């Protein structure tokens, strides 16, 4: 199975800050990497697919990058609605696996 | 697109439950569908996928105990859960796979809570 790790596990930031969340796969997954945002009590929302493509309606302050084993999502100019938990997920092969999540909190 | 799960509840260890996911707003039979679960306060865990061709795949943690199925005439996805364990306690989400068995989950239901305890 492909193991996914994320760092940091939690992050405190202020509105207007720029933050970076990283994700590492235990083996080469090319660009088969998605990012999801989840708020408490809600279902996850797809933000970025194929490592760097924003899903429809996702603000341009989000960007994704990477390939192979190392990936990142950057949020520039944090907005109040961005405080949530972020998960990476690989779909290179079965079983599909998720990272443990990064909780982004307001400082 | 809407996905609406139902069937969750409380069950004792060793018991069974059947979850349903009613889909609308898209051609259900053309898409692969999955179940993903989230234990309280924990992360996301893929459970099972059924393709539009009825190919099946399962996480090792549920293989032999859970059965995924679909009824395209009713636009409904199912998860038959048997031999339940306390570690199966979670919110169960159904999710649509965007462009095949290995692709992003582009739509999710709101989830249904399954609690397994004596």
Image: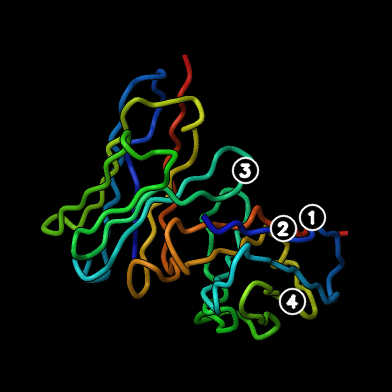
Residues marked 3 and 4 touching at CB (< 8 Å): no
* Badge 2: chain ID: A
Q: CA distance from mark 2 to mark 1?
A: 5 Å
Q: Is residue B65 left or right of residue A90?
A: left
Nearest the viewer among B62 and B99 is: B62
Estimate the x, y position of residue A48 in percent, counting from the top left.
57, 76
Residues marked 2 and 3 touching at CB (< 8 Å): no
> Callout 4: 10 Å neighbours few (<14), some, many (20+)?
some
At 60% from the left edge and 56% from the top edge, which residue is drawn? A3
> Callout 1: 10 Å neighbours few (<14), some, many (20+)?
some
Instruction: Point out which mark residue A10 bears.
Output: 1
Residues marked 2 and 3, same chain? no
* Residue that label 4 marks: A75
At 51% from the left edge and 74% from the top edge, which residue is drawn? A32
* Residue that label 3 marks: B42
Extreme residue in the left direction: B73
């Amino acid at each position: 199975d492909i193991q996914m790790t994320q760092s940091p596990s939690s992050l405190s930031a202020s509105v207007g800050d720029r933050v970076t969340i990283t994700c590492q796969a235990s083996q080469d997954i090319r660009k088969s990497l998605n990012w999801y945002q989840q708020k408490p009590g809600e279902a996850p929302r797809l933000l970025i697919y194929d490592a760097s493509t924003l899903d429809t309606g996702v603000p341009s302050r989000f960007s994704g990058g990477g390939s192979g084993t190392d990936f990142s999502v950057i949020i520039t100019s944090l907005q109040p609605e961005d405080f949530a938990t972020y998960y990476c997920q690989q779909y290179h092969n079965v079983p599909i696996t998720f990272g443990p999540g990064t909780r982004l909190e307001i400082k | 697109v809407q996905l609406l799960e139902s069937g969750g509840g409380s069950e004792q260890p060793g018991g069974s439950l059947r979850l349903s996911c009613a889909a609308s707003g898209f051609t259900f039979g053309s898409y692969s569908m999955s179940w993903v679960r989230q234990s309280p306060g924990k992360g996301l865990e893929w459970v099972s996928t059924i393709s539009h061709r009825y190919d099946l795949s399962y996480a090792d943690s549920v293989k032999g105990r859970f059965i995924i199925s679909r009824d395209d005439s009713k636009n409904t996805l199912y998860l038959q859960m048997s031999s339940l364990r306390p570690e199966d306690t979670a919110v169960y989400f159904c999710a649509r796979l965007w462009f095949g068995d290995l692709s992003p989950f582009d739509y999710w239901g709101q989830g249904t809570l399954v609690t397994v305890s004596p």
